[in-house]
Image (cartoon, rainbow, N blue to C red):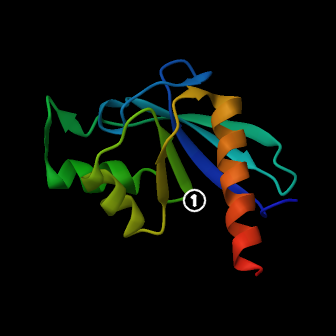
Amino acid sequence: MGNGAYRVALASTDNRNVDQHFGRAESFLIVDVDDSGSYEEIEQRFVVPICNGGSHNSDKMKRGVEALLDCNFVLAARIGPGAVDELSQHGIAAFEMPGTVGDALKKLDGYLNLLAEMQSF
């Protein structure tokens, strides 16, 4: 069962593993997922890290989120509530899903399938 096409930004140091804290990420792997759950790597998008040793500058947070506005989801090894809130204000859902890119995308697709089934009741 497919969930339609969507775009995901994955916080990764090597484009193979979701292994970065959202606020410390210097780049995100951008992938498009089709309605069958297959994905295609689009680009490695470089950003200025949001986190300054634990403190967050709201302007930096806004700029960091603006770099991902074309994405529907953000997956990171860790992500704080401020970033989750800022992303959600732009319609982007964020999840902590450390692991390989393929496994993280499978988990996300499974979660979306479960949501779709729950909404169909």
Residue 52 appears anywhere in the view: yes
Give the left or right position of residue 88, taking residue 41 as reference: left
Q: In the figure, residue 15 lies in which quadrant?
A: top right
Residue 69: % across, % down: 47, 59
User: Which residue is drawn at the image coordinates 50% and 48% (left, top)?
Assistant: 74
Q: Residue under circle 1?
A: 72
x, y percent for residue 59: 18, 54
Q: Quadrant of the N terminus?
A: bottom right
Inspect the image, locate mark 1, and give the three-letter code of the amino acid beneath it.
Asn
Residue displayed at 57% across by 23% down: 17
Question: Which quarter of the image is occupied by the C terminus?
Answer: bottom right
**Which residue is most to the front?**
121
The reply to whether residue 71 is in sight is no
Work out whether residue 42 or residue 112 is closer to the camera in this orientation and state it: 112
Depth check: give the residue in front, 66 or 38: 38
Q: Is residue 98 left or right of residue 53?
A: right
Q: Where 34 falls versus 25 (above or below)?
A: below
Most distant residue in the top direction: 14
- List x then y, in percent, for residue 78: 38, 36
Label 1: element kind: loop
Above or below — where is 7 with respect to 85?
A: above
Residue positioned 30% across, 36% down in the render:
48
Relative image position of residue 49 (x, y in whole percent): 29, 34
